[in-house]
Amino acid sequence: MGNVTITDIAREAGVSKATVSRVLNRSASVDSNTRERVEEIIRRKKYSPSTVARNLAYGISSIVGIIVPEIDNPFFGELLRGASSIADKNDLTLMCFNSDDNAEKDYKALKTLKDYRVRGMLYTPATDYDTSEQRKTVTKLIESLDIPVILMDREPAAFERYDGIFFEDRKSMYEATEKLILAGHKKIGIINATLDRGLARIRQAGYRDALEKYDIPYDEKYCYLGDYSVAQAYRHASEMLEKEDRPTAVVTCNNNISMGFLKALQEHDMKIAGDIVCIGLDKIEALDIVGSGFNYIRRDAIEMGKKAMEMLIHRMAFPTAAVQKVYLDSEIVIRKL
Amino acid sequence: MGNVTITDIAREAGVSKATVSRVLNRSASVDSNTRERVEEIIRRKKYSPSTVARNLAYGISSIVGIIVPEIDNPFFGELLRGASSIADKNDLTLMCFNSDDNAEKDYKALKTLKDYRVRGMLYTPATDYDTSEQRKTVTKLIESLDIPVILMDREPAAFERYDGIFFEDRKSMYEATEKLILAGHKKIGIINATLDRGLARIRQAGYRDALEKYDIPYDEKYCYLGDYSVAQAYRHASEMLEKEDRPTAVVTCNNNISMGFLKALQEHDMKIAGDIVCIGLDKIEALDIVGSGFNYIRRDAIEMGKKAMEMLIHRMAFPTAAVQKVYLDSEIVIRKL
DNA sequence: CTGAAAGCGCTTACAG
DNA sequence: CTGAAAGCGCTTACAG
């Protein structure tokens, strides 16, 4: 039956489209008789106006884009949940993209968002965009988008000019490492991504800060730097565990790394806490529920998603306000030391 | 600077909008000189046409809606990932909604999708819509949407007329239970949601089928029916474990239930496989990686998401084709019996 | 090959 | 209070 349009309603009610539009929007006074007649027809035909046409006429959009690098990672799932809950309350609709940590997909998503003329976007960049070419490409893209952007969790140098919300990872890593030190550990290892990644540098710095503070030498032989994959972390952890001189405690720099580490532990017949102590960044829900004794830095991604959407709404209302960077604290959850 | 429009380009190139449109769409031949001139200006001004305006003119949309009940559950995260990967390849864009298993939010999402005149939608209904009133509301809503719908994972009676993709849960539960029987278990428990939920009935039936097949009486005292929450499952499992006459093996009917069970096990100082054997529906990634010995039915949600999007694309191409129901097989992963 | 016009489904001044 | 007209940013016959 195709979609009912405002013209159908107008014709049937014997009024102009303008009048129908007025009853739809309560924008001006309409005679109560005609109003009721029009409303009755609208109800009967189950008509509601096309948001697309409406937005075209208004010249604005009620769509917000969101790009995340790993949509099936619970961290980003929670981010989405938080963002979506606030969007709902503000009549904003989410257009979702998964970049897979891949710059090309990121570009494509950005391009699509531009072509939809979305109102704003929440964005976790796929990569650090380190090479000057990448940097140029992505910068041009975002600039041509010309909409409010809120960065989430990652802040590549190319994006310093945008609002953003981040976790205090440096501080958290400091505190986690400190907890281990205060528990008597002197040989503390770290499994992290390589330091050409912004977030990895920040996390490494927190670890280092704590060692320094307590006069423990920073020793590269306890540092295992690779990527954020389970597989790589597993290899690194295995290597670590098989060494004579191995750490008595470890910090692991994201949930995948923690899993790789735990897997290695398991395969070496070692027990968490019993044989080697660990504090990981980000919870692993199943392990926590099951009571595995896995310690972790609890980053509240739902909160980040909510706040990010609120920041976006604020930015849309005040386009010229000063750039805002928000930092979220995390709590360290110790299950077994 | 506001957005560049086709009019800006036309003016600057000294041609009509129609001509610009033609170079944009390669729809008709354009003199190569004017073409190049126009293209140069487009490039210089970083212009690309508004998808919204374009779709309005075409009378179609390239947006696909997707409604899931729990966006931060890894199962649905993977569903999204799968759907999004296929959408990408077909120039379709995803509008995402999280219904939180809540009928009202479901209605609202449906309404928004209608107003956006989306092209089609992927849908996991928030509830079973059992009461006739709910059923009526949701049916009207979807009918007035008048677009292709692909159901995913859940098939409330109200939606029988739509395409859908599901897992062979009955068969999987049968096989899981059978594995336990063949391993010598006679007292096999089940923790499930209450049987007023469609999926719970299906899963329960599979369990029952296996018992019957092997002449083991179906005994209600081994059946714990509640909801799909960790907390409820935990209470049920604790109760079960404290009984004199308790099962020697259990099937758990979703990932939350499995976690509740494992938590109870842990708190009763019991070991998986050692004290009581379990096969759960859906993997729990962390437990699997860490080598906990948790057995499970592996449902491939990424595959479901991909297939669902393919079915939608097919349906959009062939609106009158026969209704299609697809059932996906799952594999049983045994880590320790 | 190219432009003027009409149309997609709305909204908003402007008259009356 | 209400309608005719113009406009949002496009596309597509229709002429020429």
Image (tube, coloured by chain):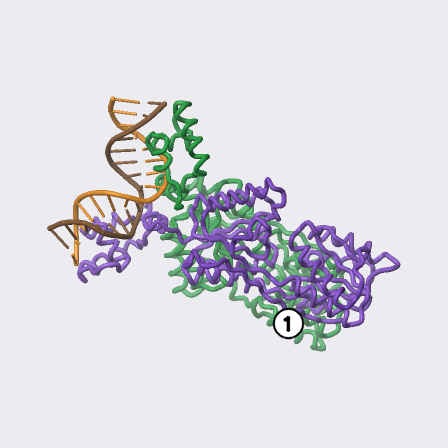
Chain colours: A purple, B green, C brown, D orange
From the viewer's perspective, is A103 left or right of B123? right
Q: Residue A155 location, x and y as percent?
A: 59, 54
Q: Is B191 located above or below residue A1 in the figure?
A: below
- Tell me which amino acid carries mark 1: Tyr
The single residue placed furthest to the right in the displayed view is A244
Q: Residue at x 67, y 74 (%)?
A: B238
- Please name whichever residue, B33 or A233, is drawn nearer the observer in this view of the structure: B33
- Residue A36, located in which quarter of the rendered image? bottom left
Residue B52 relative to residue A71: left or right: left
Q: Secondary structure at mark 1?
A: helix
Residue, x 47% and y 64% (percent of image)?
Answer: B102
B315 relative position to C8: left or right:
right
Neighbours of disc 1 within 10 Å: few (<14), some (14-19), many (20+): many
Instruction: Please say whether residue B251 is visible from this viewpoint.
Output: no
Residue A185, quarter of picture: bottom right
Camera-side residue of B241 and C7: C7
Q: On what subunit does the disc labeled 1 rest?
A: B
The image shows a total of numbered marks equal to 1
- Which residue is drawn at the image coordinates 80% and 58% (left, top)? A219
Q: Position of residue B110 (x, y in %)?
A: 41, 56
Compared to residue B124, the image places residue A278 above or below, namely below
Confirm whether residue A151 shows in the render. Answer: yes
Where, quadrant-wise, is the C terminus of chain B in this rendering? bottom right
The residue wearing badge 1 is B234
Across and down, in percent, residue B22 comes to: 38, 30
Q: Nearer the viewer, residue A302 or B14?
A: B14
